[in-house]
Amino acid sequence: MNKTVNQKAWFLVLPVLVLVAFNAIVPLITVVNYSVQETFGNNVFFWSGITWFEDVLRSPRFHASLGRQLTFTFTILAIEVPLGVLIALAMPRKGIWVSVCLVLMAMPLLIPWNVVGAMWNIFALPEIGLLGKTLNAMGFDYNYTRQPGDAWFTLILMDVWHWTSLVVLLAYAGLVSIPDAYYQAAKIDGASSWAIFRYIQLPKMKRVLTIAILLRFMDSFNIYTEPSVLTGGGPGNSTTLLSIDLVKIALGQFDLGPAAAMSLIYFLVILLLSWIFYTVMTRDEANQ
Amino acid sequence: MLELRNITMRVGTETHIHPTSLVFKPGSFNILLGTTLAGKTTLMQLMAGLEKPTAGEVWFNGVNVTGVPVQKRNVSMVYQQFINYPNMSVFDNIASPLRVGGVDRAEIKRRVGAMAELMRISAMLDRRPAELSGGQQQRIAMARALVKDSDLILLDEPLANLDFKLREEMRDELPKLFGERQCVVVYATTEPTEALLFGGQTAALHQGRVADFGPTGEIYRRPASLTGAQVFSEPPINTVKAVKSGHMISAGSSLTWVAPEGLADGDYTIGIRAHHVTPFETAGSVPVDGTIKIAELSGSESMIHFDAIGGDWVSLSHGVHPFVAGARATLYADMSACFYFAPDGTLVRSGEAEGRH
């Protein structure tokens, strides 16, 4: 048998290559370019090596932002994933209520991010917002623009409201793909609801949950619009997540070098954590 | 002994099972034969207690168990899909019904070991189901069903998803597994050949009704009705309307033969299985002229669909016969092997049961 070799096939990859170059590689190289140079304006640049990277990595400000970012991401993951699975389990599998529930669930996902931010900004205002006013009327001293704790509470509540649906929809898709026969077999065995969840539903949902966790991790780690509209990083720096801090440095102070170095570190952190997540979650399958 | 007493199943306005009464003895192998949607699975779910009948009763060993949930009855079931717990080892899968039943550790180990030996999966006890082939996965599911001493074992087309060779292998082994047990075994299948291979008793199901019930070979040769014969024929049985008058019986002008003795004059529906219609003329056979529609030629058999008197005919014969679609041809129907059904569908005379076929 002769193997047909045709190098012309590479040309078919060209359009994708050009596209990726323009939307990923070229901007990334620009950032790399900024991260190793110093400028005093007038488009004059000086080589500065890894100074900016050292600065960023040693800066307490970066550590604080990264800490807040990790706290935020892991908090919302810890709430959204179990909550999403619970809601998916409670949703009907048959009948007319299925579409009603699905549409209701998809609703928050359809709202533009800055609108979500603006909505919650007003909703939570202590004097006029429904949430803020109700909480204060109930005797809680709630003011998200003044108290860091309240700002965090609002921020997390907003994210849970906005994104739990994504986990619900993915988990639900995993659940409905389980054939009825599994439930019948479990019933015949006399398995408890917990056993059904633990030994049938959870293993069968594993793949979609892996995707849900990865998506929520990456999205929440990149989050900018909603907290920026809701709190703008405040009060003080209490809700300044990595992306908000980055924008402050790059556009507020116009420190292009440090901002570029921080972007790259930010990017590598997401890449590394995503890889760890993925490896840990799929390790079991790889062993098989 | 499992008794179904007039059980009926309605879902909304649709009747899935019309009033059905069946009795299955302990130690018996029973087959539910019927096409998809004939009601086999629903009937099994009613037997198991997974569904509650709309009307009628299910009795087990003299006790009315209607409405008793499945986990309180001693039932096992094997499905067409390979149903196992995905993240448990093969050992844990087989052991799961025993653990729920509170059997002690040493006993579990002994019984799972013995069952795995019987199912020839001993070497795979530490692995997970997904690592194994389809045939092995179904063996695990079977082992799970057999490891507890159920009173009732339901097998819902367990071999349908296996490839031909594995299916043959399992068909051979299955009856041996139930050999000495005193449980009621119910096996659902769409294939008449499978029913004939297993023997036992067969209930032929059609659109939620039992068209026929009795010893498998008996109802194959002497189906109670036309519907029963249709359920129990693969390829489909050929039917044609005929009139008997005097010594002769004729279906239209071209198809006439000598009527068997003792058959009253009148209208009949004639049923003749495909393998009694062949390209060969034999003593007593009647020529059937028609137009070839499809000729499916496998290595050793020819299945010929042709258009003749009364509509579609199917012929199944040994050897490869090069018929061409669209051509005129004459095939020969061995009328000594045909069934005579009265206009209401009940069997009047079975040629196949007369001993020569």
Image (cartoon, grey):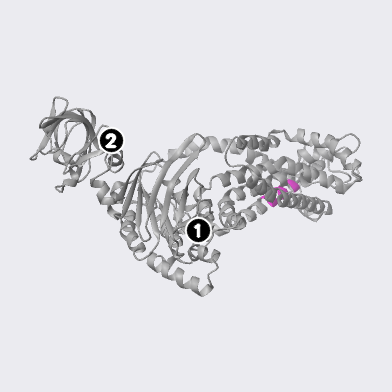
Extreme-top residue of the structure: B253
Residue at 28% across, 35% down: B345
Which residue is outermost to the left? Answer: B283
Along the viewing direction, whichever of A110 and B226 lies nearer the viewer: B226
| Mark 1 secondary-structure assignment | loop
Q: Which mark is residue B345?
A: 2
Q: Is residue A266 magenta?
A: yes
| Rendered view: A178 above or below B243 | below
Q: Count neighbours of disc 2 (C-alpha within 10 A) and say few if under 14, some if 14 to 19, many if 20 or more.
A: some
Q: Does residue B197 appear left or right of residue B102 in this picture?
A: left
The residue singled out by tag 1 in the image is B73
Q: Give the range drawn in magenta.
A: A262-270
Which one is in front in this view, the residue at disc 1 or the one at disc 2? 2
Residue A95 at what x, y percent from top left?
Answer: 58, 37
Q: Nearer the viewer, residue B234 or B324?
A: B234
Kindly identify the amino acid type of the residue bearing the numbered disc 2.
Answer: Gly
- State whether residue B250 appears in this view: yes
